[in-house]
């Protein structure tokens, strides 16, 4: 239960960074941390459970890496923010 809350808090940080990158072009070092977190967590849970949500986490992590390179799409960014926000809602509920 504690681990679920921790994942929710880190996902909330990811949502905040994705929103900041969409509106202000933020390319902060934390985006690398969030990208690594999403890719590692997604990979571990995909290997353990083959869960589609974990596979989407991997995609979100790679998208965070593309933002750090200056490549972004506001539509994709919005979809990822909504996806991660619903995960935050259910994990911190």
Image: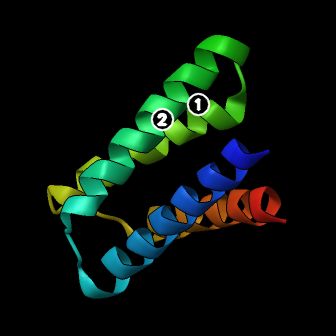
Q: Mark 2: few, some, or many residues within 10 Å (few <14, many ≥20)?
A: many
Say if mark 2 contacts mark 1, CB within 8 Å: yes
The residue singled out by tag 1 in the image is 55
Q: Position of residue 72 (x, y in %)?
A: 29, 63
Between marks 2 and 1, how big is the CA–CA gap?
A: 5 Å
- Residue 79 to residue 20: above or below: above
Left or right of 31 in this view: 86: right
Going by the picture, which residue comes out furthest to the front? 2
Q: Mark 1: few, some, or many residues within 10 Å (few <14, many ≥20)?
A: many
- The local secondary structure at tag 2 comes to helix
The C terminus - image quarter: bottom right
- The local secondary structure at tag 1 comes to helix
Instruction: Return the mark for residue 58.
Output: 2
Q: Residue at x 19, y 61 (%)?
A: 29
Q: Residue at x 70, y 55 (%)?
A: 5
Q: Residue at x 19, y 69 (%)?
A: 27
Going by the picture, which residue comes out furthest to the bottom? 24
């Amino acid at each position: 239960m504690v681990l679920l809350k921790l994942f929710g808090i880190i996902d909330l940080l990811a949502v905040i960074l994705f929103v900041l990158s969409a509106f202000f072009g933020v390319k902060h070092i934390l985006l690398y941390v969030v990208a690594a977190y999403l890719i590692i967590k997604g990979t571990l849970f995909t290997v353990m459970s083959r869960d589609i949500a974990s596979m989407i986490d991997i995609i979100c992590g790679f998208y965070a890496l593309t933002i750090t390179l200056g490549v972004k799409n506001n539509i994709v960014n919005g979809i990822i923010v909504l996806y991660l926000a619903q995960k935050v809602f259910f994990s911190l509920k």
